[in-house]
Image (cartoon, grey):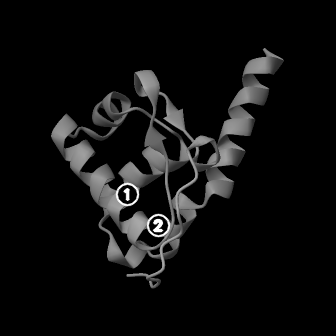
Amino acid sequence: GRKKISRQIRRLIRRLTGGAYLRIWQNRRLFNAATLCVAYDRFLLGLSYRRIEQKRGLSRRQVQTIVRRLQGWLDGCGQTGITTGPAGMSTSPAKQRARPQRTTGGGP
């Protein structure tokens, strides 16, 4: 019903304003097509590893490796993505504990 749609819209807005996917998309020349697809599924749609595996025909290890590399790249840029919280729930950066800012700047 309306509540479910409203909740889905709020989650999508939170992911868009978090900036992880947008940051990856702006630097898409650095990534191959499979990595961009996984980034879209994980950072924008918030899909689980299992759903990404099924959708993209990848193994669990491949999905985990791609997400780990993307997360490391985002962290190196001073940008946080989504992380897995209790019981595999995705949590936005706003709901995570505050992290100290990195003093070494710079992107890729």
Q: Point out the residue furthest to the top here.
A: 1
Provide residue 23's location: percent of width, then percent of height: 52, 68
Q: Residue at x 34, y 76 (%)?
A: 30
Q: Would residue 17 appear left or right of 100 to someone viewing this image?
A: right
Answer yes or no: is residue 68 visible.
Answer: yes
Provide residue 96's location: percent of width, then percent of height: 56, 44
When the figure is inspected, residue 40 is found, relative to residue 105, above or below; the finding is: above
Number of numbered markers: 2
Q: Secondary structure at mark 2?
A: helix
Crowdedness of circle 1 by 10 Å Cα count: few (<14), some, many (20+)?
many
Quarter of the rendering occupied by the C terminus: bottom left
Q: Point out the residue furthest to the right here.
A: 2
Q: Which residue is mark 1?
A: 71
Residue kind at label 1, given as amino acid type: Gln
Q: Secondary structure at mark 1?
A: helix
Q: Residue at x 53, y 41 (%)?
A: 45
When the figure is inspected, residue 61 is found, relative to residue 78, above or below; the finding is: above
Quarter of the rendering occupied by the N terminus: top right
Q: Which residue is mark 2?
A: 24
Out of 80 and 43, give the one closest to the viewer.
80
Q: Of marks 1 and 2, which one's residue comes earlier in the chain?
A: 2
Residue kind at label 2, given as amino acid type: Ile
Q: Residue at x 35, y 37 (%)?
A: 52
Provide residue 100's location: percent of width, then percent of height: 53, 63
Out of 81 and 33, give the one closest to the viewer.
81
